[in-house]
Amino acid sequence: MLPNFLIIGAAKCGTTALYYYLKQHPEISFPKLKEPKFFSSNSEIFPHNGVGDVSVDKYAVKSFEKYQKLFSKIENKRVGEASPDSLYFHKKTAKLIKEKLGDIPIIIVLRNPAKRAFSAYMYLKRDSRESLSFLNGLKAEEKRLENNWDYIWGYKSCGMYYEQVRTFQHKFSNVQIILQEDLHANTNKVLKEIFAFLNVDEQFKVNSSLQHNLSGMPNNIFSRFLLSRNNFYSTFIRELMKLIIPRFLLEKVAEKTLERKTLLKEDELYLASYFYEDICKLEKLTEKDLSHWK
């Protein structure tokens, strides 16, 4: 069967965590490939030209036939997938999703856009893809995207949520907006709301103790080598480790070896000003209190 719901949202908004929470539910299933990127692949030009982009491009499913095969052996009350970039490429993806999957429930995960931008930056630093300072990365964004770097390099553009969300709300009947901050602070409460939205058992309890897809700077040479996506040997070893080591152990190692950095106050104030108008419009559109983002 094909997906009957989708998780979308900007990169580093918590879609990976939500994916691992929901897949624990006995009435919800996902394919092994979390982000098929089928719907966005029709909006992009491959290969992308950013540092390490090719290592991510290889996972994109570009034909509907291959997309269907991902779900050919899956049967459950709810079947979903979690390609966050469907939100960014909303002008084309919303229409295509509606054509291929119908008027299905859509879960959109959003995060304070300033903190999301910095988290995306640190994620790319973690993988040895970003060489610039955060401020210079912001300045380089427009030229990078013009030169066909992958969407994750859009530190500011990814956080302009209003038009993205508006498109999906106009196209689909059932759209649930989840804030990453709420998912992190009140995990069980938010998951219960999502279970109700998907019409599955609301009382099911998930294991939410692990953190997923962490950003940060590796604090030793081995971790720096292993996490690099700009090195053939490290990529090969990392993919091999994924096959033989359980994910929860890899996540535990990441927690110990990544040094978490915080957004400088002056950069946060600059981005808060940059996003202010978009946040105000989004607040009215979603009827959610976003004052903590301003």
Image (spheres, grey):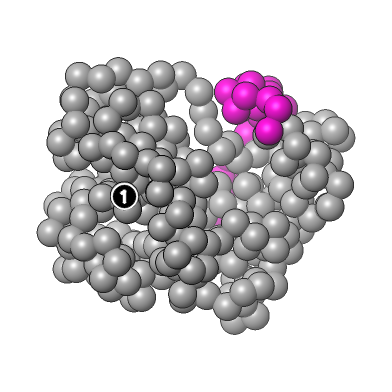
76 to the left or right of 222: left
- Spot occupied by residue 186 in the image (x, y as percentages of width and height): 30, 26
| Residue extent of the magenta highlight | 243-268
- Spot occupied by residue 215 in the image (x, y as percentages of width and height): 60, 40
82 to the left or right of 212: left
Q: Is residue 279 visible?
A: yes
Q: Is residue 260 magenta?
A: yes
Q: Residue drawn 65% across and 71% down?
A: 48
Which of the two residues, 206 or 11, is positioned nearer the viewer here? 206
197 to the left or right of 19: left
- For mark 1, does the 10 Å Cα neighbourhood hold few (<14), some (14 to 19), or many (20 or more) residues? some
Seen in the picture, residue 13 relative to 187 is either above or below; the reply is below
Residue at mark 1: 1
- Spot occupied by residue 112 in the image (x, y as percentages of width and height): 39, 49
280 to the left or right of 125: left
Q: Residue drawn 31% across and 43% down?
A: 79
Query: Type of residue at label 1?
Result: Met
Q: Residue drawn 84% across and 52% down?
A: 232
Which of the two residues, 196 or 189, is positioned nearer the viewer here? 196
Seen in the picture, residue 223 relative to 8 is either above or below; the reply is above
Q: Main secondary structure of the magenta part?
A: helix
